[in-house]
Amino acid sequence: MQTRLQEMKQSALAQISQVADAAQLQELRVKYLGKKGELTELLRGMGGLSPEERPVMGQLVNEVRSALEEAFAGKQAALEEAQLAAKLASQSVDVTLPGRPIPAGTMHPLSRIIEEIEDIFIGLGFDIAEGPEVELDHFNFEMLNLPKDHPARDMQDSFYVTEEILMRTHTSPVQARTMLKKEGKTPVKIICPGTVYRRDDDDATHSHQFTQIEGLVVDKGIRMSDLKGTLLTFARQMFGPSQQVRLRPSFFPFTEPSAEVDLQCFKCGGAGCRVCKQTGWIEILGSGMVHPRVLEMAGYDPKEVSGFAFGMGVERIAMLKYGVEDIRHFYTNDVRFLSQFNRS
């Protein structure tokens, strides 16, 4: 039996050394070390040995098993190493080739417009003020001369959390909050950028969520001419030095008098075209002198100070500046659209 064991060992080692792939190696492993392998068959024959021979043969069988397992493991590692080397050789990379540049992202067009508007008004001495998007009815409406029964609320129907908490419909609440913090002190000179929400049907020119920038100036001797001069300066810096603005009478509960502000059509220069509907002008924002009641509620004496306010939709400005026909393009995250604004 000992002779058979040694012969099997030598034969197995010789065959292992000649194996060319993992499949053949596995076949040999089963042949010699499997449940029905040759080594197992030899172990079954130990029942016929004398008690003195069994420990000796048992030790020898374990030594042979260990030698074979070591040989199988070594061959397995050698085959894997050879396979990896062959794969690397066939898939070699020329490290001297230039790398492929990864395209960098770019600023969103709305963020770019907000930044441009902020830069213009900061240059005019304005500060940036921000406030919560989830707002109290008190600041969103009542502090702006819109009591609970005011019909103008229907134009700014919003998403309500409770009867007194809602998603803000404009950034004007930031103006009210800022004036209260000032405690009657002047000057107040701020713009308020931010996201606002209104219940509206989404289409090419409307969205239930959009971005506004509102402005407020409160001080002694503020006049309507200051409002027009400020907006004219903004329009010329944003759309070109030859730009003109036009103020048309309108109504807003929080300003008196109020005016819609039109921009001379950039497409036709005022001659009339499809973009401006043959009028020569394009509406861009609403404005007016701060209502005396709004000043009073914020702690100011309307006999001593006055102010003007304005509000513009960032998407509206971006659509005019970049010639975008559908407001929804700003929100769909389509790379084909956004890549047009890459400055690199």
Image: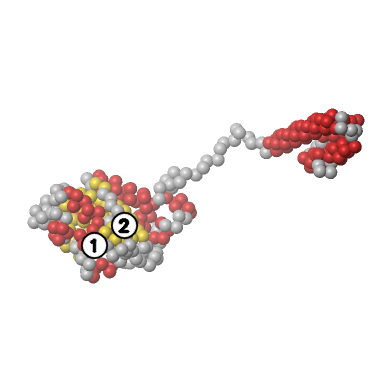
State yes or no: discs 1 and 2 in contact (Cβ < 8 Å): no
Q: Nearer the viewer, residue 35 or 163?
A: 35
Q: Position of residue 258 (x, y in %)?
A: 19, 62
Q: Position of residue 317 (x, y in %)?
A: 33, 56
Q: In the shown orientation, is residue 105 left or right of residue 30?
A: left
Q: Secondary structure at mark 1?
A: loop
- The answer to whether 104 is drawn above or below residue 3 in the figure is below
Q: Quadrant of the C terminus?
A: top left
Residue found at the far left of this picture: 303
Q: Position of residue 137 (x, y in %)?
A: 25, 61
Q: In the shown orientation, is residue 69 left or right of residue 5?
A: left
Specify the color scheme: secondary structure
Q: Quadrant of residue 297?
A: bottom left
* Residue at x 23% of width, y 60% of height: 138
Q: Would residue 2 be seen by someone viewing this image from the given angle?
A: yes
Q: Would residue 244 be seen by someone viewing this image from the given angle?
A: no
Marks counted in the figure total 2
Q: Position of residue 277 (x, y in %)?
A: 33, 67
Q: Quadrant of residue 54?
A: top right
Amino acid of disc 2? Val
Q: Which residue is denoted by mark 1 in the rendering?
A: 141
* Residue at x 84% of width, y 40% of height: 40
Q: Nearer the viewer, residue 175 or 242?
A: 175
Q: Which residue is denoted by mark 2 in the rendering?
A: 134
Q: Label 1: few (<14), some or many (≥20) within 10 Å?
A: many
Amino acid of disc 1? Phe
